[in-house]
Amino acid sequence: MRLRSKKVFAAAGATLAVAAGAGGALAAGGHGARGRAEHPGPAAIASYLGLTPAQLREQLRTGRTLAQIAVAQGRTVAGLEDAIYADIESHLDRAVANGRLTAGQEATLLARLKTRLDDIVDRSRPALGARVARPRLVAGAAAYIGITPAQLRTELRAGKSLTQVAADHGKTAAGLKSAILAAVKARLDKAVSAKRLTAAREAAILDRLSAHLDDVVARTAPARA
């Protein structure tokens, strides 16, 4: 009983991540642990929103929150929270009926869920393109400058901008920006080829990066002691 209860607690915790659109279960296709379709989360949320789980995943990958998607679909945030709560409660009720969870444990989990519902529906995950591009920005800049990414991060933490680091190593700001764009584009090209990103989305990310690149290379972070 104790081991099973721990597993159900773990599944419930994963459910909160799934509901937020940040869990591996949602990204993998809306199934829970061990691939069971009855795991709570994506299907019930998508059903309330009038979407398929695949359509919900696609919208979440753009960085939108569940609340934003609900409003765009003509639904209410309160109704969305009720749908999430009712779905998780029904699964926990089943666990209690099967002897896998006590009524007290269910009450604890549901109370925790109530305190987190607003955060769940308002939380956004970074858009897929941004998650793909960010590591390449640092790696591309470091390769152009002629240092490792770790060395670059150390210099940035000292309060320098990318432009300052490049100049210290005899490189130009123009060359730095070209190197960053090329590195990010190469990474996004792979994501498009793997069908993890659309060509239109890639173009939009690159356009946005180009428009803000001067700020990116000139930006400094507070020096860390």
Image: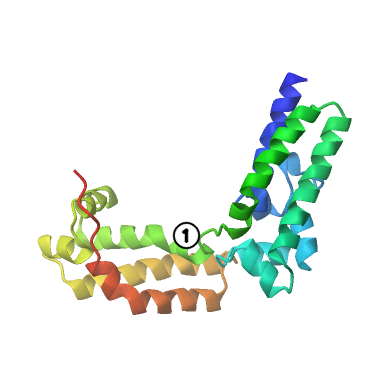
Q: Pick whichever, 199 or 62, lies toward us.
A: 62
How far across and how far down the image is residue 181, in percent? 34, 72
- Per the image, the residue denoted by label 1 is 131
- Pick out the residue farthest to the right: 97
How far across and how far down the image is residue 139, in percent? 32, 58
Q: Amino acid at mark 1?
A: Arg
How far across and how far down the image is residue 102, in percent? 79, 27
**Would residue 139 appear left or right of 194 to someone viewing this image?**
left
How packed mark 1 is, by other alpha carbons closer than 10 Å (few <14, some 14-19, many 20 or more), is: few
The residue under the point 47% across, 61% down is: 132
- Where's the N terminus, which quadrant? top right
**Would residue 143 appear left or right of 118 to someone viewing this image?**
left
Task: For residue 149, say whether it is visible.
Answer: yes
**Would residue 148 appear left or right of 84 to someone viewing this image?**
left
Rendered position, 6 above or below 32:
above
How far across and how far down the image is residue 219, in percent? 25, 65
Count of all numbered marks drawn on residues in the image:
1
Q: Pick whichever, 150 or 94, lies toward us.
A: 94
The residue under the point 28% across, 52% down is: 149
Rendered position, 198 above or below 54:
below
Rendered position, 57 above or below 2:
below
**Would residue 130 appear left or right of 198 to someone viewing this image?**
left
